[in-house]
Image (spheres, rainbow, N blue to C red):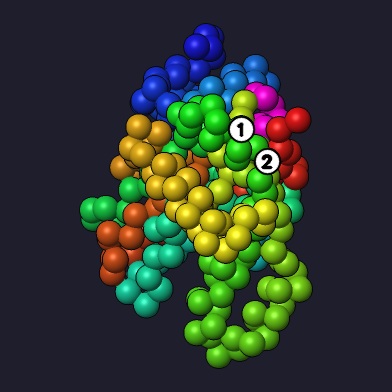
Amino acid sequence: MGSYQRIEVKPRTRAIGADVSGIDLSGPPDDETFQELKAALHEHLVLFFHDQQMSPEQHRDLANRLGRTEVHEYFPSLDGFPEISVLEHDAEHPPISDSWHSDVSYRSDPSMASVLYARTLPSRGGDTLWLSAYAAFDALSKPMQAFLTTLHAEHDFLYAYGPLLSRLDDAQERIEKARRDTPPVVHPVVVTHPVTGRRLLYVNPTFTRSIVELSRSESRAVLDLLLDHLRKPDFQVRLQWRENDVAIWDNRATQHYATADYYPEYRRMHRVTVGGDRPLGVN
Ligand code: SIN
């Protein structure tokens, strides 16, 4: 367990999640405090900060300190801030993130972190859950771990967003553009985290289409087994949001699921993702 001088870190479960206090994210935090924040992120994978007052500039700049900020292919941006995705849902725009995923795993270099800020919440519901993909890997038997380290999986933007795009008036154009801009990519099924060196299970039900080395039926069976295993509550933490909460997560070592139980109420979140490297397998 890390020891922290500048911030207070209160773990939520054994596997994942911690509440962090003693830090004003709008600050901006000084270098030492920020180094502690990063250490806590590697230790607990998702950090929760409460009662934070950040302007869009401060939100973007905070994410920028973790690394290069990105622009999302699908979500609209906040005016003047292309990096801030507005995740906004109501009766006309039903929630779409109620499926486990790590953000943009369909890119060749998926995001390393995300910074999510709760702006408007429904009267009840709209919680987000995260799971530890380290804990999920660690809990598998050694022969299964060894087998999985030989495999690679295809991740595809259109596997998730194709059905949504196909309902739009300009569906064909949007789908062709998506195919050009974000073609399917192949990542190892077991990834070595570039900072911690720990191994993690890197398949998710939203973007992972198939395991390339296996037959279609083998791929489906192995993916179903892994996706079911990943969902085990022992690997999870759940945040019941309050307005002005911020969650920062390690997008490589976790997956998340935003509950859709508040539909048709309104919920609005602002998210900035931070660019990462190509996921590496196990040597
Ligand atoms: C996301 O998938 O990044 C959104 C999570 C949320 O809205 O709680």
> Magenta stretch: residue 247 in it?
no
Residue at 76% of width from left, 30% of height from top?
283
| Figure disc tally | 2
User: Is residue 201 visible in this depiction of the protein?
Assistant: yes
* Predominant secondary structure, magenta span: loop
Image mark for residue 117: none
Residue that badge 2 annotates: 150
Residue at 62% of width from left, 48% of height from top?
273
| Residue closest to the eye, 267 or 193 | 193
Judge whether 182 appears above or below 7 on screen: below
Residue at 33% of width from left, 48% of height from top?
127
User: Is residue 107 visible in this depiction of the protein?
Assistant: no
Magenta range: 192-197
Residue at 71% of width from left, 58% of height from top?
185
Q: How crowded is mark 1: few (under 14 residues within 10 Å), some or many (20 or more)?
A: few
Residue 47 appears left or right of 155: left
Query: Are the two marked residues, 2 and 1, in contact with CB atoms closer than 8 angstroms?
Result: yes
Residue 18, image x and y in percent?
42, 26
| Residue closest to the eye, 213 or 76 | 213
Amino acid type, mark 2: Thr
Distance CA(mark 2)–CA(mark 1): 7 Å
Residue 235 appears left or right of 190: left
Q: How crowded is mark 2: few (under 14 residues within 10 Å), some or many (20 or more)?
A: few
Residue 245, image x and y in percent?
41, 40
Image mark for residue 146: 1
| Residue closest to the eye, 16 or 183 | 183
Amino acid type, mark 1: Ala
Instruction: Name the element at disc 2.
Output: loop
